[in-house]
Image (cartoon, grey):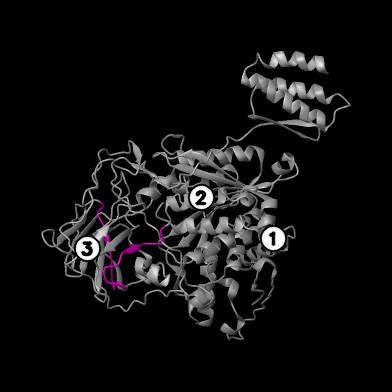
Amino acid sequence: MKEQWDSEKIQYQRQTSADLIKHLELFCTVVMKDDSRCDSCFLSVSTNLSQTLRTRQLLIDFDGGRPILSLRAPPDLVNFPSVSRPRWPSECEVISDTIHHIEWDPPEPEPFYQLTGCERTPMPARKDKGKVVYFTDHAMKHAYFTTSRFGGSKGPIKNATYDISESDLILEFESRFESGNLQKVVQVGVYDYELTLRTDMYTNKHTQWFYFRVRNMKAGETYCFTIVNLMKSNSLYSVGMRPLLYSERAAKEKGVGWQRIGSNIRYYRNCNQDKNSVPPTLYSLTWTFQFPYDSDTCYLAHCYPYTYSRLQNYLRCISSDPNVASYCNLRVLCRSLAGNDVYVLTITSRGASKCEDRMKKTVVVTARVHPGETNGSWMMEGFLDFLLGESEDARLLRDMFVFKVVPMLNPDGVVVGNYRCSLAGRDLNRNYKTVLRDSFPCVWYTRNMVERLMTTTDVVLYCDFHGHNRKNNVFMYGCKNHGEPALRLRERIFPLMFSKNANNKFSFKSCRFQVQKSKEGTGRIAMWNLGIKNSYTMEASFGGSTLGDRRGTHFTTQDLKSFGFHFCDTLLDYYDPDPSKVNYCLTELSALRRDLGIDSEFSVSDLETRYSFTVALLFKVDCEIFTHILYIDMCLIGSKSISLLFNQSFFINNSFLTTSPLLMSA
């Protein structure tokens, strides 16, 4: 044995790195043919090879007598700076102020604004009227992204505020901080202001996200803000959604954070718009409100901000916790166009052997491909809080699965305050099929990671967390299986289960299951085409819920986090070794299709609409009573002309509670 080792030692030193692996496997095979082998022999082989090759990067493990070769992960691959300093495009002016918001939930859910029908539409000011009180230059040095720096432009920060002193009754605005968005403000009345948002960088569209600071206010006075260049034809602001306000003084003195504010809220098409303007149609959002304190520092936002720096601080806490580090690896998946790190977490319990780990199924979860959809990040944080916790359910999930998590797919867009695009000026969620790695690194590397995973493990579910601007509640978009008829309902089971775990916030009625050609570049369809049959986009409304005891109330940050908890809960239900829950949901969906005589190529949401309308006609009852077929109660019908038999079944374990009616006969 000693002579053979000396001979092989000389040969190893003369090989290339690729040949070394090949010869190493051969040598280990020779060693293992010796019947006298033992664990100490294996350890000796590993130690001697490391010394011979003069490297600690090569790891040798043995599983059932077979050598398993791997490379040691680079130490300290993720180094978080003590102070987060994201990279900005070099032409961006960034103020040095540190922005911090406390996390707080109101004691009671905040209600939607109740429209009166008397909300006024402010007359827009003529171009030669009004006083410009804030303006940031949107003109870029180039029409496309070129370079980036920590902290943005190296030159002095220009004063974007015009002729304002504390004695004036003019508000002082600022948005040149992380995730901020406000380009121009014109004072058109003593307390009335017209606001213009900045489009996504290197584009001329996508104005929806706003987040800015206000100072020099007077408490008790009613201010009117009107954003004049929104581009969506409709919005949740039309049905009661209210903007958010954060007062630094209220946070310091009362511990109160972001609050919903506003009256006289109206979303409408601009009436005096130039027909030759681009885009041809713009919309306005107007609202009135009062500041709580004089001379305070306040922030207003479209949704609860969640910055790249907040994510880095969260991940820093994870990586510094030795308990979490035992089952969570944090690495850099790639770097964005601006050079910001895109992180990936691998979360799973350590098996007895690497072979056992490879047998686990994999779940891939991503978020924040659209930077203005901050609710996706709050859901992601809730998901990670649960999965990295010490509960029995969290341990069980880590034992069952390997989780690959990309918490922020578009850090550049988040940093600069975009609503939808990256610094390439394109929507990343339409470019998952791209071959342009250098132009779209975040989604290219994510897809590549999944493709590599699928060669070694079974990726059973993919979900991308989003926010939705035109529909209330939480819901999912899935894909339609065109294969075996029995499988066409399978992709609907997970969302149906989710609706039972969060029945006062999740709307199964709003779910859609389609594969549209225009959406083939999305993560959901791209992953489905790779072979992941359970591939979803989970959408959380910017507004709130219209269901159950939460009807007519806004979502809070804790609500958004809870959807991450419910996602984990639903995973446990869906992959429960006892198949009764899955079979029950499958039977329920199959019965609905069969009893209503609808072709197998049906949409569950369409089915619900048809059923609600038909029953309402039969009984002359308001359609809204029947909008969700899973919760019809016999007492609502009150007619003996048709006999309905309701089969009520309950699954209490894992918060899985179902009351499900089946239409049996007429």
* Secondary element at tag 3: strand
State the image coordinates of residue 13 (x, y, percent, origin top left).
Answer: 66, 15
Residue 648 included in the magenta stretch of the image: no
Q: How much space separates mark 2 and mark 1, taking CA atoms?
A: 24 Å
| Residue 47 showing in the rendered view | yes
The one of 83 and 329 positioned closer to us in this rendering: 83
State the image coordinates of residue 38 (x, y, percent, origin top left).
Answer: 84, 31
Q: Residue at x 75, y 44 (%)?
A: 352
**Mark 3 or mark 2, earlier in chain:** 3
State the image coordinates of residue 407 (x, y, percent, origin top left).
Answer: 51, 50
State the image coordinates of residue 476 (x, y, percent, origin top left).
Answer: 52, 59
Q: Quadrant of the C terminus?
A: bottom right
Which mark, by number, is residue 392? 1
Say left or right for 441 vs 611: left
Q: Label 3 sits on what residue type?
A: Glu
Q: What is the crowding at mark 2: few (fewer than 14 residues within 10 Å), some, or many (at least 20)?
A: many
Say left or right for 347 vs 509: right
* Secondary element at tag 1: helix
Tell me: residue 543, above or below residue 230: below
Q: Report the residue marked by disc 2.
A: 407
Q: Which residues are magenta?
A: 279-305
